Amino acid sequence: MTAGTKMTVRDVSVWYGAKPALSNVSLDIEREEVIALIGPSGCGKSTLLRTLNRLNDSVAGARVQGLVTLDGEDVYAPATDPVALRARVGMVFQAPNPFPKTIRENVAYGLRIHGLARGRADLDAQVERALTRAGLWAEVRDRLGDPALSLSGGQQQRLCIARALAVEPEVILMDEPCSALDPIGTARIEELIGDLRGRYAICIVTHNMQQAARVSQRTAFFDAGRLIEYGATSELFTNPRETRTRDYITGRYG
Ligand SMILES: Nc1ncnc2c1ncn2[C@@H]1O[C@H](COP(=O)(O)OP(=O)(O)OP(=O)(O)O)[C@@H](O)[C@H]1O
Ligand SMILES: [Mg+2]
């Protein structure tokens, strides 16, 4: 682990029942970088994300072996509170999933459950800051009391990002955050990822090779639960070491 490392994954394997989903994966997630996870459907990308913030805890039959650390501390240690962990390691899902509440309440929710706001004015200020960072404030400032579900899909996804940012996470996990968005919505999210880089460690799953190349500094390629290649994005896309990586990124996979 170097000074710049935020999370480490060491020899991690995950099973669902008897079925292995990840096998002996090791990689580091750096503080100021965006890491892209790529690979064919079913290779274990979402499983790895869920392993980083213990979302697999609630999946019946899921079993995790190996070491995952956040700032050097074991994420799976008995003393780690999974709810507190998920505030530090936030998640944005594939389909925007705002709560059926107002725009304001969606962002305020985490602040309330974690007791992070000191009164109404502070809550409002934090809601504004999160919406501003998510690039949504200008579009919603006059309609904070409207239902979140009245927003467009792209706006809903930025709202979900604001909801994750509100609790001041240190790591943001994004599982195909643009797959339900049109090209304009996608461009907004990619721009946002660029703005957020440096402030948060970001780990994004994507099926879009151009997107991985545009937004990430490092890329990890997985196949059948194994980490095949991990390195600088510029290197991996122009000069992959492994044949399987080359076949996948050039669309010759399968
Ligand atoms: N809750 C679950 N119960 C049983 N098996 C699961 C569960 N979740 C995932 N799996 C299996 O684990 C393997 C990895 O799944 P995962 O969702 O991590 O893949 P992925 O790389 O995210 O795929 P995709 O690109 O399609 O989202 C797959 O074989 C999948 O069927
Ligand atoms: Mg997935």
Image: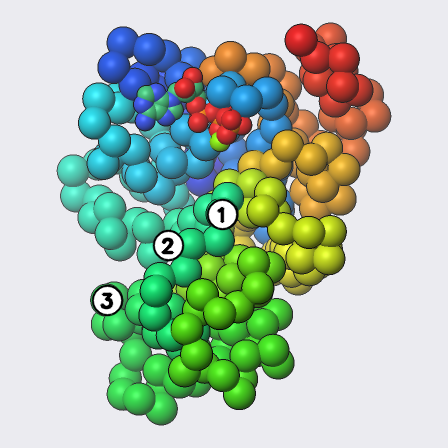
Camera-side mark, 2 or 1? 1
Would residue 160 appear left or right of 245 to someone viewing this image?
Answer: left
Which residue type carries mark 3?
Ile
Q: Is residue 8 above or below residue 202?
A: above
Element marked by disc 3: helix
> Which residue corresponds to mark 1?
95
| Number of marks | 3
> Which residue corresponds to mark 2?
88
Q: Is residue 188 above or below residue 78?
A: below
Residue 55 visible in the picture: yes
Which residue type carries mark 2?
Arg
Real-space CA distance between mark 2 and mark 1, rounded to the nearest whole angstrom: 21 Å
Residue at horizontal 49 percent and vertical 83 percent from the top: 143
Element marked by disc 1: loop
Real-space CA distance between mark 1 and mark 3, rounded to the nearest whole angstrom: 23 Å
- Within the displayed image, which quadrant is ligand 1 positioned in? top left
> Which residue corresponds to mark 3?
113
Which residue type carries mark 1?
Ala
Residue behind label 3 places its C-beta within 8 angstroms of ligand 1: no
Q: Position of residue 133 (x, y in %)?
A: 57, 70
